Image (spheres, grey):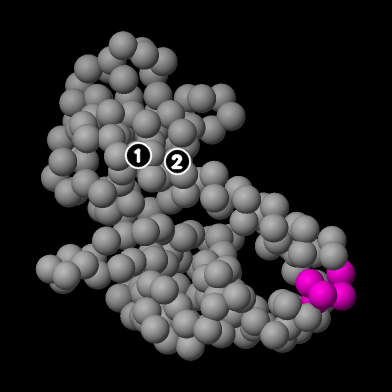
Amino acid sequence: MPVKDWLAPAIRAASSERKLEAGEALFRVGDKTAGVYEIVVGRVRLVRVDRSGHEVVLHVAGVGDTIAEASLYSPHYHCDAIASTDAVVRLYPKAAVLSAFTQDARLAQAFTAMLAQQVMSLRTRVEQRNIRSARERVRHYLSANADATGRQVTLRGTLKDLAAELGLSHEALYRTLAVLERTGAIKRDKGRILLTGKAKAL
């Protein structure tokens, strides 16, 4: 759901933009929350670091996406937000957002609808992570993210970003895509994966 559906003029007026360099942290786990962020340019990944120091990617947000929605109801962030590329983000301050929602229930309902869509997306990602086979995990991703025609998936970032989102090493993802392409299930073309419709191959 577009940000404009819940973005009241008062929220827009209170917003501010920030530029990030690739690798720069927007916020870290435990930092005091400031509000909801919209990605204006580039990509930002939400991550947690496990006990071994390995970065676990929770989500990669691109242009038009929002992150840190839970910050409206929490005093501290629960993960790190790191710029995957040079990026520009727009902050919608917590106080302005909550005030607008109190004054206009329709905005709050639109925001809730957006959160419901995100929950459905999260469930899909959890389902993907529970698939043991790399090939089946990739197949699930392609099926779930195909466009309305069911024939094309537009990649939001690099293949390395996709590998992190799927919980695969980039080598495992490259090998899997190569097998699918060799068997005729897919074709790759500049940021897109075309599905050939050969279900058995895919």
Residue designated by label 1: 128
Left or right: residue 164 versus residue 111 is: left
Residue shown at the point (15%, 35%) measured from the top left: 175
C-beta proximity under 8 Å, tags 2 and 1: yes
Left or right: residue 138 versus residue 61 is: left
Across and down, in percent, residue 153 comes to 44, 36
Q: Which residues are magenta?
A: 100-104
Across and down, in percent, residue 173 comes to 21, 41
Q: Main secondary structure of the magenta part?
A: helix
Find out whether residue 101 is within the magenta segment. yes
Residue designated by label 2: 124
- Quarter of the image with the C terminus in it: top left
Q: Nearer the viewer, residue 108 or 11?
A: 108
Question: Identity of the amino acid at label 1?
Answer: Gln
Across and down, in percent, residue 44 comes to 42, 67
Q: CA distance from mark 2 to mark 1?
A: 6 Å
Occupied quadrant, residue 56: bottom left
